[in-house]
Image: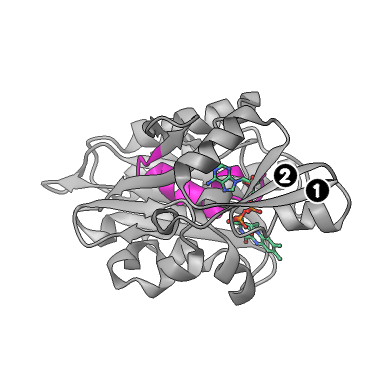
Amino acid sequence: MLGLRSCATLAEAAGILSGDRQAVLVGGGTLVMRDVNEGRLTEGTLLRVTDPAFRQLNASGGRIELGAGVTMAQVLASRDLAFLHPAARAIGGPAVRNMATIGGNLFAETPYGDFTVALLALDAQVVVQAGYGTGRGVPLEEFLAGRERGTLPGLITGVQVSRPANPADFRFRKISRVKPKGIAVMSIAAHLPAQGGRIMQARVAYGAMAPVPVRARGVERALEGKTLDAAAIQAAQQAALEGCRPATDAIASEWYRREVLPVHLGRLLAGEAR
Ligand SMILES: Cc1cc2nc3c(=O)[nH]c(=O)nc-3n(C[C@H](O)[C@H](O)[C@H](O)COP(=O)(O)OP(=O)(O)OC[C@H]3O[C@@H](n4cnc5c(N)ncnc54)[C@H](O)[C@@H]3O)c2cc1C
């Protein structure tokens, strides 16, 4: 049988999640409740967090803190988060965005997880709280590697990112067959900070090109120290597939994903409108 329990504090939820293997946190519930409704989840306790900190958004400064329970609609309502709007707008339709949380997106199985791709390109830290102690920051890339291995982290209380010095340095693109709310063939995010016209410490991430969102390290290397001209974009396209392990699913075949990735990466880097 399934039970439902409300937790007034993050610590209470984290404590229960650590001690009870059958406890399942409900963020917005867009995925969890589908499992319940379709009979895949029939035992255990569904945990709801009512602690206001879970939905708190602190985005006015350079260091941005987003509670894991912040929804895509909340992101879209924040002018301070305008650079993240393309990624938040890429999640489902309005009804889904009203419920879907940032925390839940971190766990969404590929080809979902579009917002997480944006966070990965921004070098986000995930705040993990295991048990009743305080939370600790874990690089998102590390969290995703653990998720792929099947490690359960406990409660994610929030996510932290640094604001890009120039909003134009951050780019996001989701490629889908059905517009505007189709599931991703792939999504690509790039943070391309530049000094004196040369790219320094680029971070590029893909969704739906591996079992979890991954960094495009070959592309990052190809862009390092370069001006973003046609030659640099071509070099990046040549390195685009490094580290990719796309699947064949109902949306696209592995072959198709590999074929079109360099094209879409080139368009994103060239700043072409869709
Ligand atoms: C019609 C439809 C369209 C969709 N379209 C998209 C799309 O375009 N792109 C996309 O990326 N996704 C899409 N999704 C998937 C989903 O809505 C989003 O990924 C969403 O962000 C998941 O968040 P949630 O809060 O609803 O997750 P939930 O369903 O609440 O949780 C999902 C999983 O994460 C765990 N979890 C959630 N929060 C935490 C936390 N803070 N700590 C620990 N564990 C946690 C839950 O226990 C569960 O296992 C779609 C879903 C539907 C139904």
Question: Which residue occupies 45% across, 66% down?
Answer: 86
Q: Nearer the viewer, residue 226 or 165?
A: 165
The foreground one among 4 and 113 is: 4
The residue indicated by pointer 1 is: 2
The residue positioned 63% from the left and 74% from the top of the image is 95
Give the amino acid at mark 2: Thr
**Ligand 1, image quadrant it occupies:** bottom right
Name the residue located 29 percent from the left edge and 50 percent from the top edge: 229
Where is residue 194? Give x, y as percent: 19, 47
- Magenta stretch encompasses residue 212: no
Q: CA distance from mark 2 to mark 1?
A: 6 Å
Secondary structure beneath dot 1 equals strand
Instruction: Check contact, mark 2 vs mark 1: CB within 8 A.
Output: yes
Q: Is residue 13 above or below residue 152?
A: below
Q: In the drawing, what numbered circle is on residue 172?
A: none
Under mark 1, the amino acid is Leu
Percent x, y of residue 132? 46, 32
Question: Residue sitting at 50 percent across and 63 percent down?
Answer: 71
Reading the image, the residue beneath label 2 is 45
Q: With respect to residue 97, does 255 lie above or below? A: above
Q: Quadrant of residue 148?
A: top right
In this view of the protein, which residue sits in the foreground, 33 or 106? Answer: 33
Chain part drawn in magenta: 106-126
Q: Give left or right: position of 210 versus 141.
A: right
Left or right of residue 210: residue 72:
left
